[in-house]
Image: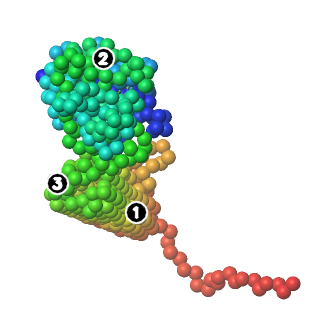
Amino acid sequence: MALNVVVMAAGKGTRMKSALPKVLHRVGARSLLQHVLDATAGLGPTHTVVITGHGAEAVEAAVAAGGLADAQCVRQTPQLGTGHAVQQAVPALQPQHATTLILNGDVPLIRSATGAALAAACGGERLALLTIELADATGYGRIVRAADGSVQGIVEHKDATPAQRAIREVYTGMMAAPTALLVRWVMALRNDNAQREYYLTDIVAMAVAEGVPVVATAAASETEVLGVNSPLQLADLERRYQRQCADTLLEAGVRLADPARFDQRGTLACGSDVEIDVGCIFEGRVVLGNNVQIGAHCVIRDAEIADGAVIHPYTHIDGARVGAGALVGPYARLRPGAVLGREVHIGNFVEVKNSTLAAGAKANHLAYLGDATVGERVNYGAGSITANYDGANKHRTVIGNDVHVGSNCVLVAPVTLGDGATIGGGSTVSKDAPAGTLTVARAKQVSLPGWQRPRKQPKNAG
Ligand code: UD1
Ligand code: MG
């Protein structure tokens, strides 16, 4: 059945106390609105209409960038209520025989399956409401039923009598309606109520009056119908979302030390027997192979980590690839373009940027490798750096296989160290080092016999 989706996103979000439009605040690094649009995409709608108003330019730019190709934005100014919002979408609601599903841009964790169930409950001929029972229903529209249990209407909290306020069953803000009827009903709405607003919820009584069946579908969980109005609610939804991500990984066999101390802000694909200690943050697209271990408090973004690699605590990885069996950290930093081969070792306080290290290469302490090509089994000593930047341009350092770079060397790029070369500690290497030789480029050591340390002058008594 053809489906239209209307996403209401014009509201101000005053309680966020933020310059950012409410629907652009983020859960799991994705905007609230993008979560809703992603769930919408899963329904394969004919038309998706986003109602914008507050911060319209920014919201419309986000919709355009969000990758839902056929989403169309319609502005609502001024904002005179949810019924008024849907009125703005009317010209875009085609075809008229379709079902129209109404979602909220600030209810991010709604699942595609729930939207599909609601659309199916409508079936192009009934008005289907997504409802939930709440212990505290304050602020919500109450579902008013007749003695026989049939839905009679929705009454907004501000318009409700004390008896109606005692009702726990509430409208979640999401519904599905036959498009032609919805269009006729919203155009007939009036604003003679406590808030002087056009209430979308008033169409329920219209349906009842016309004998159109109204069905209430209960939401599967509270989480998927929770909206965001304040930073507190945003933080609560972030935790719920993170718990969902953690549970998905745990069910797939990933061993998270503590699902409550885990953050995923993108996609994380894991092989078998992966272990992730507490406090790690995964951003962008991260792929972990089989038997990978991630130590505590690592931040890993846009990275591929191959089978059996071990990332020790407090390591930062961004835009890098780590080979099978490699050991990285603790306190290591892999920056964009770092590519580590099999069994490479990168130790504490080592920074690698735009460099390739071949199998078995080691840089275990306090070092920098930038714009370097490092051969197999190279040992790169503590405190050594590539001087890759001359103040204007970057240059490459090429280190052959089995090279041994002593401690505290400065490799002034462009420079090449041939296979098997040894560089004496403390050298500043600005010319190529031939293969198989020892290169030392430091001041000669001298010892001066008979030299005396200065002595402190005795203080004058006066
Ligand atoms: C609405 C429902 C209420 C329901 C509750 C669930 C109505 C009249 N009431 O109340 O029954 O229990 O949601 O959360 O619909 N919006 C616009 N333009 C407007 C007004 C609102 O786009 O002129 C958007 C908001 O950005 C928001 C959504 O519509 O995404 C709901 O608006 P809100 O003001 O939060 O409605 P409630 O009063 O909470
Ligand atoms: Mg609301």
The residue carrying mark 1 has its beta carbon less than 8 Å from ligand 1: no
> Which mark is in front, 1 or 2?
2
Give the distance between the C-alpha atoms of the residues marked 1 and 2, in whole angstroms: 63 Å
- Frontmost residue, 203 versus 205: 205
Camera sees residue 46: no
Task: Say which label, 1 or 2, has the lower sequence index.
Answer: 2
Q: How is the image coloured?
A: rainbow
Percent x, y of residue 50: 32, 24
Front label number (3 vs 1): 3
Residue 83, above or below 270: above
Which disc number belongs to residue 186? 2
Name the amino acid, label 1. Answer: Phe
Q: Secondary structure at mark 2?
A: helix
Q: Amino acid at mark 3?
A: Glu
Q: Residue at x 18, y 18 (%)?
A: 211
Q: Which residue is mark 3?
A: 251
In the rendered image, which residue does mark 1 sit on? 349
CA–CA distance in space, label 2 to label 3: 45 Å
Q: Position of residue 436 (x, y in %)?
A: 29, 65
Residue 105 position (above or below residue 308):
above
- In which quadrant will I find the C terminus? bottom right
Kindly state the secondary structure of the residue where label 3 is placed: helix
Question: In the image, residue 321 lies at what x, y percent?
Answer: 26, 52
Q: Quadrant of residue 228?
A: top left
Q: Can residue 242 be seen?
A: yes
- Mark 2 Cα within 10 Å, few/some/many (few <14, many 20+)? many
Residue shown at 32% from the left, 58% from the top: 261
Distance, label 3 to label 1, CA atoms, is: 35 Å
Please report whichever mark, 3 or 1, sits nearer to the chain's N-terminal start: 3
